[in-house]
Image (cartoon, rainbow, N blue to C red):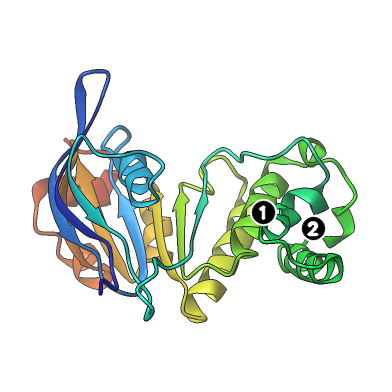
Amino acid sequence: MSASFQLEKIIFSRDGRRILGPITHSFSESGFTLVIGPNGAGKTSLLRLLHKLQEPDSGYISLPLGKNGVPQRQSFVFQVPILLHRSVFENAAYPLHLSRGSSAQVREETMHYLEMVGLNDNHGAMAEDLSGGQKQLLQLARALITRPKILILDEPTSNLDGRSTQTIEALLADQYHIDTRIIMTTQNVVQARRLASEVIFIHEGQIVESAKASAFFDKPLTPQASSFIQDGIVR
């Protein structure tokens, strides 16, 4: 029984160009992992592979399994929110409708999660009329409403202002402290310092370093990681 993601000799290519690999890596069973690295390093592709949004060219990925041997519930938050052409309430409630809960249960749970992200007063508005930060908060509510054991996020605050970023970071910290396994990409070293319990550093499609956050930031082992921590670029 696997309690963590296991990657074995993963290779992933797009349009004939290798994006990732070969990668062999075992993720820790718990924690708040920040996957960092420069633009184009392969961070998003790694997350999409973990969530089975795409398949590797070769190699094998085993998903975390619960006590009953069934893959643990996962949710994915995209960098650019993907929302339905429906109301805020209907967007948030969509996963619950798929699981066929009663109307009363769906409404109660949906309003709870909209209140959690500060959108309960906007529940009747159309999703496309929200601000950028509100759209990302709605996407996060929709991801959390299924109560996932694993939450995967692809640079969820990269296009947001400081206030929206702060709100989302606080929500993620709360989820982590109630035992949600979080894996998130960012190019923001300061954000990674704030949030991470561990760091995976990717460069040119390879996992160059993987360490506890304190060790990684205090004493990186490679010149590429050291340069990225200092300037946000790899020389």
Could one spot residue 229 in this view of the protein? yes
Tell me which residue sits at (33%, 45%) in the image. Answer: 49
Where is residue 207? Give x, y as percent. Answer: 17, 49
Name the element at disc 1. Answer: helix
Q: Relative to 80, does residue 47 appear above or below in the rendering?
A: below
Name the element at disc 2. Answer: loop
Q: Are marks 2 and 1 in contact (CB under 8 Å)?
A: yes
Tell me which residue sits at (16%, 58%) in the image. Answer: 25
Tell me which residue sits at (26%, 39%) in the image. Answer: 233
State left or right for residue 48 relative to residue 82. Answer: left
Query: Of the residues under marks 2 and 1, which one precedes in the sequence?
Result: 2
The amino acid sitting under disc 1 is: Leu
Name the foreground residue: 14 vs 121. 14
What is the distance, in whole Å, between disc 2 and disc 1 at their CAs?
A: 8 Å
Binning the other alpha carbons within 10 Å of mark 2 as few (below 14), some (14 to 19) or many (20 upward) gives many
Q: Which corner quadrant of the image does residue 206 belong to?
A: top left
Where is residue 156? Give x, y as percent. Answer: 52, 48
The residue labelled by disc 2 is 119
Tell me which residue sits at (54%, 73%) in the image. Answer: 175
The amino acid sitting under disc 2 is: Leu
Binning the other alpha carbons within 10 Å of mark 1 as few (below 14), some (14 to 19) or many (20 upward) gives many
State left or right for residue 158 relative to residue 198. Answer: right
Name the foreground residue: 137 vs 13. 13
Label at residue 124: none
Q: Relative to 35, does residue 38 appear above or below in the rendering?
A: above
Where is residue 16? Give x, y as percent. Answer: 21, 19
Name the foreground residue: 139 vs 187. 139
Q: Relative to 33, does residue 86 appear above or below in the rendering?
A: above
Q: Which corner quadrant of the image does residue 193 belong to?
A: bottom left
The residue labelled by disc 1 is 137
